[in-house]
Image: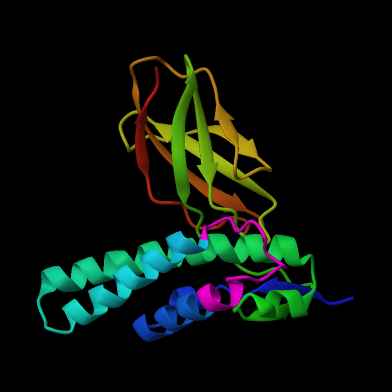
Amino acid sequence: MPIYHVSVGFAQGGDGDVETRADTVFKKMTGNVNFPDPDVPLADLNTALLAFRKGRADAANGGSTLTLIKNNLKAALILLLRRQAIYVEEVANNNPEIMASSGFDYYTASNTQSELDQTVILSAANVATTQLLIRLLSVINAKSYEIEISTDGITWVHIKTSTKARSILLENLKPGTLYYIRARAVGGSTDYGPWSEIIQHMAT
């Protein structure tokens, strides 16, 4: 039986490709009974889409500052689309017709492992003394996720490997210490995906 995945190829597309994909997903998921509880509320997706559309128009007038703003808006929109794509794949449960009804493209996976996407640290929160709860963006085909911390941003220490992306508890941290945190997906043809962008958070 073939295995189907929602394509996230839009992330490598141009401005027009990303805007069109977001617009299509918003329209096709609105009122779609297949997706009653989207990971990204459709109102939030539409707000990000409209902001990016305006950013494109503003950047067309020229200027490095406006272009930087537009690029940041594009990155934010892509992040929301990637989260929504993972939700659609989970809900569709290998049904390509349901996947297509979302407005995303899909593809058939072979048995050959592929390179993993970069994860994103969505949030970090203090849940108790010496403990942080980390939430990552799930990566398709990842078997687990590796977390490293640093107190100087140079020397890194492995602290946790988890099979769950959305709830990773880091323990035995030192109160009052500002930690640098990074994460990556494990699996695929290269064993590891690229490291996420580094965030900073203080333990309590």
Q: Position of residue 161 (x, y in %)?
A: 62, 38
Residue furthest to the right in view is 1
Q: How many marks?
A: 0
Expressed as whole percent of the image width and height from the top left, the position of residue 4 reads 75, 74
Q: Residue at x 37, y 62 (%)?
A: 76
Q: Quadrant of residue 56?
A: bottom left
Left/right of residue 78 with respect to residue 69 in the rendered view: right
Verify whether residue 180 appears in magenta. no
Q: Residue at x 70, y 52 (%)?
A: 143
Tell me if I can see residue 117 in this picture: no
Residue projecting furthest to the front: 31
The dominant secondary structure in magenta is loop
Which of the 4 image quarters holds residue 112? bottom right
Q: Considering only vertical position in the picture, is 74 above or below 180? A: below
Q: Nearer the viewer, residue 76 or 13?
A: 76
* Residue 31 inside the magenta-drawn segment: yes
132 or 197, which is in the foreground?
132
Horizontal placement of 13 versus 63: left or right? right
Instruction: Residue 40 in the image: state x and y as whole percent.
Output: 53, 58
Colouring: rainbow
- Above or below: residue 13 compared with residue 126: below
* Residue 170 appears in the picture as rendered: yes
Say if 14 sits above or below 172 in the image: below
Q: Nearer the viewer, residue 196 or 81?
A: 81
Q: For the C terminus, which image quadrant? A: top left
Point 80% across, 73% down: residue: 95
Q: Tell me which segment is drawn in magenta.
A: 25-41
Image location of residue 173, percent across then percent down: 46, 19
Quadrant where the N terminus sits is bottom right
Residue at (62% x, 62% y) in the render: 86
Q: Is residue 182 left or right of residue 177?
A: right
| Quadrant housing residue 74 | bottom left
